[in-house]
Amino acid sequence: MSVAKPQGVSVTEAGSAGMSVTEYQRIGERVRRKKLANGLELRVVPRPDYARKYAFFATRYGGMDTRFQLDGRWLDTPAGIAHYLEHKMFDTEEGNALQELAKNGAEPNAFTSNAMTGYYFDSTAHFEDNLRILLSFVSIPYFTKESVDKEQGIIAQEIRMIEDNPDWRIYHDMVQGMYRRNTARIAIAGTVESIRDITAETLYQCHKAFYTPSNMILTVVGDVEAERVEELAAEILPASGGPEIPRDYGQEPDGVAQHAMKRAMEVATPQFLTGFKCRPAERGDDWFRQALIGELASDILLGESSPLYLKLYDEGLINSSFGGDYELLPGYACFYAGGDSRDARAVTDAILKEAARLGGGDMNLDFYNRVRRTIYGAYVRSFNSFETIAVSMTEGYFHGYDPFRFPEVFEAITPEDVSAFLRENITPENCVLSEVVPADDAPEET
Amino acid sequence: MKFIRKPLADGVSLTYLPARKFKTGLLSAQFVAPLSADTASAYALLPSVLRRGTVSCPDMASLSARLDNLYGARIDDTVRKIGECQCVGFTASFLDDRFVPGGERLLESVTALLGELLRSPVTENGAFVPAYFDSEKTNLLDAIGSIRNDKRLWAGRRLLSEMCAGEPYGVSRLGEEADADALNNADAYRRYQETLRALPLEIVYCGSAEESEIENAVRAALDALPREDVRTLPAVLPHVPRADVLRVSDAMDVTQGKLELGFSCGSDDYMALLMGNTLFGGSSNAKLFMNVREKLSLCYYASSAFHRQKNLVTVSSGIEFGNYQRAFDEIMEQLRMVQNGEFEDWEIDSARSLLLNSYASMGDAQGKLENFYLSRAVTGFPETPETLSENIRDMTLERVIEAMRTVKLDTVYFLKGKEAAE
């Protein structure tokens, strides 16, 4: 198994039918796991008192996987192709899987992110039938020229909708200013122009490369028979997995491409994101640890109870829309914060100054411990959500860690880890300030 | 699922939803005001000003510290529009005792803090702290302004405000900018005192505590609340259907057009309209999705919503400016088909299954439960997820068709680009 063995208070024991069972007493969870002969990773998280049953079937393939090697040849595929493929996977020879699932009262959907594509349904009845449909349509591609062409109008309108969204614009501008080569800078849905080059043939190639059982994970949350899930997966999916697909995310140079950018849009108030290019994480426990350090650093530097937040809020420089986040992708790490503000530059300067103070080791331990409690509570709370459980399991599997080991990994982090993170990453050299201002206030600059 | 709603004081009720399966407890306290253009922004401002500080925690720093120490318990200020009412207050979410390291109990501490936020704000010279009032007023103005940033939301708001002009339902959840701008501290504080005294207060709890535990905690937190002349909420005014369709459009610097249609419903067979709407545009299996999107590739989203309290249906879609007429015609054609009973068995079966699925899974999400039982208390509709399921199971095709035949186009709103307007 590629997932680290649970430690601490968690206990592993052999389950029936060859599935391992892991108990996580501190967060009240239990997971059944198995890697099938074809390489598929299978996880079942029981929820005995719930009517809902949720299945999430994901491939390690997303918007950033545009350049890869298949059958010994490097392929460059159009921006937005993973997302386009996600749309087209619902087509089946008999019709459309979305409708098949909806007939059973299931609520199916899918999403594409930078590094994964996930397909799921939520249902209270006909679980096995729904799971059969999910596993079949995702593993059996069926495209025709007509059906691929027809999708262009739909996705073009999805792209237009995204492009009119100021939150997305600010974020996308920031990432493009921060990374020169890493393919996380590519818009997940592509552009209206880039998707014109997508053909049925390219879609088949991408499916062949990435939708193999050995590149995928199936997570089920709910009151289900784990053995039946395993039987169905073995019956419906291909008997063997595929080769490891080499990917090229681009050779990223040090430093950012552009420190500041401003765009005029139809917005009521100016909005901004100030982002910092950070050191990427290594696969495995380092990834999880780094993600948690970044989150802790974000809350300590600028979370709702931080001295900086309270000061900026009092000064009217930010409002409750202000918040930060930290994200990791292969070869990519980014810490960012933003919201509405009349003076984004002043907020950015204040963030840099506070990061330098905390990075210098001037950390109030009382406050540090309070924030730790809050994050602990937020993590446990987040496992109320079936979606969060499934997506965390999937990300953990793709990046080599176990998200349910949260208490143990989190407790091993020290104040010095947080200081060092801020000192190394939150610097003027790594900083990119992206702003959107009301259309009538400023000319377009970007 | 089991639930109990009981009066605790004059116009104060507790809805108790016992559930042991969640990691958290949820406690919500909502004042219910009649929705009105004159008062909407004043009520919307209240919870955010109260959230700034209490007598014992007079600033955000001390409040945050207290919540952090309760393992990141959240107490969020909320403003909701439910029918022609406005619900303002707080929703708290906190770890269930089983998951608190060291076996600390959080229920009583969180309930007490919620009580303080409701009834013991920090004050200055008989009003709110001026700095808190001013900055929350600015934030409210920003929030009203930023509805414009989300074009789909904006278009939906514009449709309802035009369609239901002069009716409370046309009033926005946060009120209008001009009204928010005119608010002053002294009036706001008087409004607050009147709220405490006279507005119905709905408390909803969902979690693992016993009924007596939560009841005692809430009683202690709201001890001797000064209640008198509690208001009765007015009944919802039925929408007055238009003889001629109202057509409105705005132009903005956008790349996608937003087409919104509003329909009045003449039938009072609520369940049949709900099912008819699901069939028409309420899911990814509905006629609008299957035809406007999948068959004609005109849009990414095309869906409809049934506004039960007001008996309206609205349709929402994002399209290329030039496709206005095609999209409009196709939406109307799909409605005509529903009204003529032109659908196949699987369409009605899936609409039915989808609704049954949503009722069956409601007990699995605390937020949905809270919203459902709060709405139930506010509107006085007697249904539970169980009775709704029974109704939908028994629903006949004939009832759906008959009810949908009373659905009539009332208002059309189109958000277009600036070039398209010229």
Image (tube, rainbow, N blue to C red):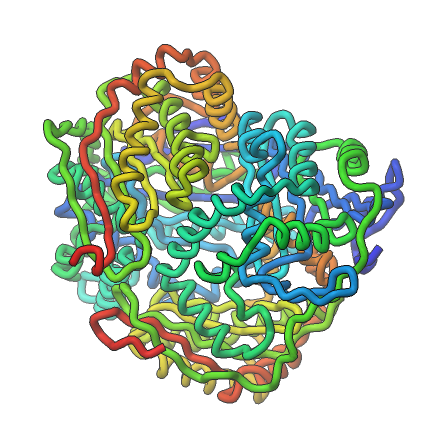
Q: Residue at x 18, y 30 (%)?
A: B234
A374 on left or right of A350: right
Q: Quadrant of the N terminus of chain A?
A: bottom right
- Between A113 and A369, the one lying in front of the other is A113
The answer to whether residue B235 is seen in the rendering is: yes
Q: Position of residue B53 (x, y in %)?
A: 34, 63
Viewer-closest of B4 and B259: B259
Q: A250 left or right of B169?
A: right
Expressed as whole percent of the image width and height from the top left, the position of residue B247 reads 15, 40
A339 is higher (above) or lower (below) than A89:
below
- Which residue appears at 53% of the width and 67% of the height? A186
Question: Relative to A8, does residue A318 appear above or below in the rendering?
Answer: below
Left or right: residue B262 versus residue B113 is: left
Q: Quadrant of the C terminus of chain A?
A: bottom left
- Give me the residue at 43% from left, 56% from top: A159
Q: Nearer the viewer, residue B414 or A75?
A: A75
Numbered circles on residues, count? 0
Residue A59 lies, with reference to residue B410, above or below; the image says below
Q: Position of residue A79 (x, y in %)?
A: 54, 63
On the image, the x and y values in percent for residue A61 come to 65, 57
The reply to whether residue B123 is visible in this rendering is: no
Q: Is residue B410 left or right of residue A91?
A: left
Q: Quadrant of residue A418?
A: bottom right
Q: Residue furthest front?
A: A145
At horizontal 49% and vertical 62% (from top left) the residue drawn is A194
